[in-house]
Image (cartoon, rainbow, N blue to C red):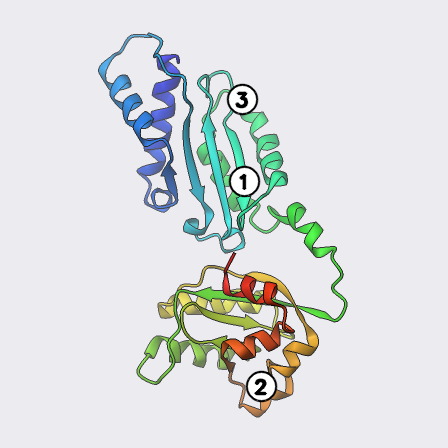
Amino acid sequence: MDIVDARRQVAEINALLGQLKYSHAVEITTPALFGRLERAVGATNSNQTLPVKKCLSLSIKCRELDIDELAGLILAIDFPLDYPSSSSCSITAINDGEDAPSVNERIETYLRSFAGCECLELILDWLSDNRSTCLSCSSNNAESEDTAGKIKCYVLRFNHLLSGPEHKKEKAMMDAAKKMKLQGGLLWGTPGIVVVVPPSTEEDAREFVSESRDIGKRPDGVEAMHFPERGVEEAGLGGLAQQKRGGKLQSLDTAMLRTACGGDEDLLRSVLGVR
């Protein structure tokens, strides 16, 4: 491995780790090799070749970048030995535990215009600029499934949501939802789940995410899912049932959430975030 490429790789990663907005999202997956390269480039100013055969690797967790649309996306990135002077980095995208090859292709196509350049901040800028469409290709197959009798809802997962007047943050969340006229239900416990149903929209769900963060409750993001319309009605989510509750979100237990899922155990596990 050329010492110049080693210096540039080490400097690029350290520059990213030195930025607070990125440092918590980046994990070096070859820490021993990174430490070895750091020592090597700091110990010599010559243009020698280093006896390295393994590629430096890292991962970027989009959930830690506050990009709600990409909360389930992780990028595994490898630096070839001749990166960045003669090649670009190699990217493997995984979304919600499944390969997302369309994301790989789109990022790699974008990086071709920057041959010879460091790529990490370019990738992060691209993700931010394309947050709304990044996963559109990989999600088209799911969208094309038969959705007859189903409605698109939006799921927000919290680490925990605790019921009772003594839990002031949760009470403030419920008050904010009522003020917004947010339609849906809330599952108390660990994890805490909010299901937003029509006529509330994705925009409404994201506004509620923002309100929740201001209150001090941080959800993982907003995930669109199709629920059976009949199940949503039977669970009392939204609509006339919510009006009768004075505009409050429906308090749910697991059995009621299962009803909203139409008894579909796979959908229920997805809503709960159990993969």
Compare residues 195 and 272 and report the one nearer the observer.
272
Crowd tier of the residue under label 1, counting other residues whose Cα lies within 10 Å: few below 14, some 14–19, many 20 or above = many
Q: Position of residue 98 (x, y in %)?
A: 57, 46
- Determine the CA span between mark 2 and mark 1: 40 Å
Left or right, residue 238 beside residue 127: right
Task: Tell me the tag on residue 115.
Answer: 3
- Mark positioned earlier in the residue sequence (3 or 1): 1
Disc 3 + disc 1, Cβ < 8 Å = no
Disc 2 + disc 1, Cβ < 8 Å = no
Q: Position of residue 123 (x, y in %)?
A: 50, 36
- State the residue lying farthest toward the left: 43
Task: Tell me the tag on residue 179.
Answer: none
Up-down: is 145 above or below 51?
A: below
Q: Which residue is painted at 77% across and 67% down in the image?
A: 148
Between label 3 and label 2, give the one nearer the viewer. Answer: 2
* Residue type at tag 3: Ala
Q: Which residue is mark 1?
A: 93
Q: Secondary structure at mark 3?
A: loop
Up-down: is 136 above or below 171?
A: above
Q: Which residue is mark 2?
A: 242
Compare residues 161 and 172 and report the one nearer the observer.
161
Q: Position of residue 234 (x, y in %)?
A: 64, 83
* Residue type at tag 1: Ala
- State the residue lying farthest toward the bottom: 244
